Amino acid sequence: MTPSPARRRRTGTNGAAPTHNLPRRGAVRRAQTITTYGVGSLIAVDHESFIVSGLDEAERSWSRDESPRIHERRLARVLGVDYFRLPPASDDTSKDGLRVRRFPLMHSCPECNDLQRHRDFNPPAGRSVCGTCEVDLVPSRFVVACEAGHIGEFPYWQWVHRSADRDATTAGRCGGKLKMRTTGHTSSLRSILVSCTCGTAPEVSMEGSFRRRALKDLGLTCRGTRPWLGASAVAQECGLPLRTLQRGSSAVWQPVLKSALSIPPWSDGRTDPLAEHWDALREYDEREHVAIYLRGVFKGECPVPLDEVMALLDAEREEDPDGESSPVPDHRYRALRNKEYERLRAGNEESEHSRDEQFVCERPLGDQSVLAPLGVAGPMLVKKLREVRALKAFTRLVNAESTTDSTEVPLSERPLRWLPAMEVRGEGVFLRLDEDRLNAWEKSVAVTARVERMRTAHQRVLEQRADDPSRVVPSPATPRMVLLHTLAHALINEWSLDAGYPAAALRERLYAADEMAGTLIYTATSGSAGSLGGLVAQGEPETLARAVRSAVRRAEWCSSDPLCMESEASGAGGINLAACHACVMLPETSCEHNNILLDRALLVGTPDDPRLGYFEDVVQGQ
Ligand SMILES: [Zn+2]
Ligand SMILES: [Zn+2]
Ligand SMILES: [Zn+2]
Ligand SMILES: [Zn+2]
Ligand SMILES: [Zn+2]
């Protein structure tokens, strides 16, 4: 990780980023640059604090070999880009890395207690110490943010002077100097005291600064600052309410991640050279025109035969949502999953596999009828898969899962043709639930009533978190979704306890909608292919039937019962029913849904109502 240079750097003559010697601030694993330290997030390195720069800068500074392009056409299309790039790893071997800028700028000196901008301390070059006292400066623990994703300095001057004077951002009008000191040994807000040497206002503590209306009461609203874009980015009009946050709080930054499995006909890499041309190609209906375009671009050496290009264009149009010219993005993600579901369900013939095919999905050889009594259907062995996970945007204050596009903050100031993404490769087992059995089960009054309690609780939490309830998305909880979700967790537990896969190395991918009822459980490693072999063997019908039975029986019991089984969806964040860390919750890397919307009762029933359980027969029959 390197801080942005103040001046623009030279670019190498061949377009490659020049080597340079900006100070390295720390190491960040590649995957973290998507999930934890993406654009706009805050990062603490030793006693300093930075904000990760926008992609406008990355486009100039990320070198092609350290940050190569990757392709996943279906995902790119939904996200409105041509391709993706792996972020550079910021380890000792990398020449460049993530660019960061100092943020917040307000710092205090524990020795002289001055509270001012970093540069006003006159620190010696490359060091973050008070120029007078030579002790380490402390970055402000507090920042302010709004729901539109702006972030700024905490308005200390206004806080002390109880003033809404917007031009006095750091100090100033009164002629005084701000001071910050802490009393006692606690880190409570009450013990942090801010004052001004002008003497016109009494010393105040930080207590109350986190109240929802604290800054509004002072007459302060968001000024639209976007420090991750650098000084050249003009502040946007905003005026939304400001909230005070701790620098390290998860509300400061949440990634909006979107992912797709690579499936045929896009998954053998042959179409990658065409990535930047699809939008142009889609303008043509006539084969002749497509041919002319390709000749122009590839000078007669198009890597993909014309017939195939035409077939791919048809495949694309088929995935276009019908009738709507600008469909709700949410629908488009659902269409993405739908296609995956179809592919996972159908599999692909071995004859279709080229050496470079990244999706290999086959029906198991064993007799599937052993699964019928369980209500499980159509297992598939996914011998090879590739998932691309892209960072689309980020949010502040709002939960990324519950946002609509309007609260998402783009990663660059100008729209770019790419987004940062990770690719993982692995293998997996796909299974579905028997549709007739599922339809009958999910219509039961007891089941719908139970899941409705969970859905309302979840909806309430989503609305409470948002300042504007009209922008809240509906909770995805349905009987089918919660059942599939809990089953996926129970199976991951089973395979990790019985077959020795570390639970954190397995992941779920749910396909739950009116026309879908399946789950994929897969290994996902971002290194070279397949470090945990053999998961597909778990998908053979006999083995799978045994695992489902065992998983269900395991789910009957939790060391926190009867509390766990009797728990109600209530309390802060408690959006699960019978589920806790002692039973079906998983490491966060395994779960698509933040470990919420889980309920063991939908698998096994409750003591009072065994029929709630989809796998009631397994429980009764033991
Ligand atoms: Zn000092
Ligand atoms: Zn003053
Ligand atoms: Zn704002
Ligand atoms: Zn439990
Ligand atoms: Zn989950």
Image: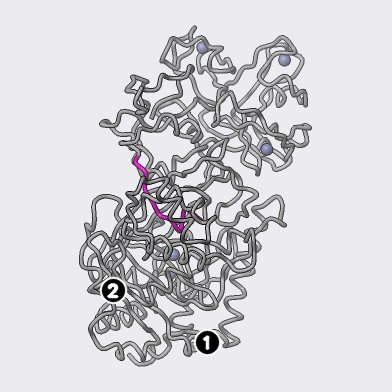
Q: Quadrant of the C terminus?
A: bottom left
Q: Residues within 10 Å of mark 2 (few under 14, many from 20)?
A: many
The stretch drawn in magenta includes residue 392: no
Q: Is residue 461 visible?
A: no
The mark closer to the camera, 1 or 2, is: 2
Tell me: residue 579, above or below residue 404. below
Residue ID at (34%, 68%): 492
Q: Nearer the viewer, residue 296 or 254?
A: 296
Residue 373 at x, y percent in the picture: 36, 91
Q: Quadrant of the N terminus?
A: top left
> Of marks 1 and 2, which one's residue comes earlier in the chain?
2
* Three-letter amino acid code at the position of disc 1: Asn
Residue ID at (78%, 36%): 217
Residue 520 at x, y percent in the picture: 37, 70
Residue 221 at x, y percent in the picture: 74, 35
Residue ID at (35%, 37%): 88
* Three-letter amino acid code at the position of disc 2: Leu
Residue 2 at x, y percent in the picture: 40, 26
Tell me: residue 602, above or below residue 334. below
Q: Nearer the viewer, residue 337 or 196?
A: 337
Q: How is the image coloured?
A: one colour
The residue beneath circle 1 is 439
Which disc, if any, is residue 381? 2
Q: Nearer the viewer, residue 217 or 305?
A: 305
Q: Which residues are magenta?
A: 68-77
* SS type, badge 1: helix
Which disc, if any, is residue 237? none
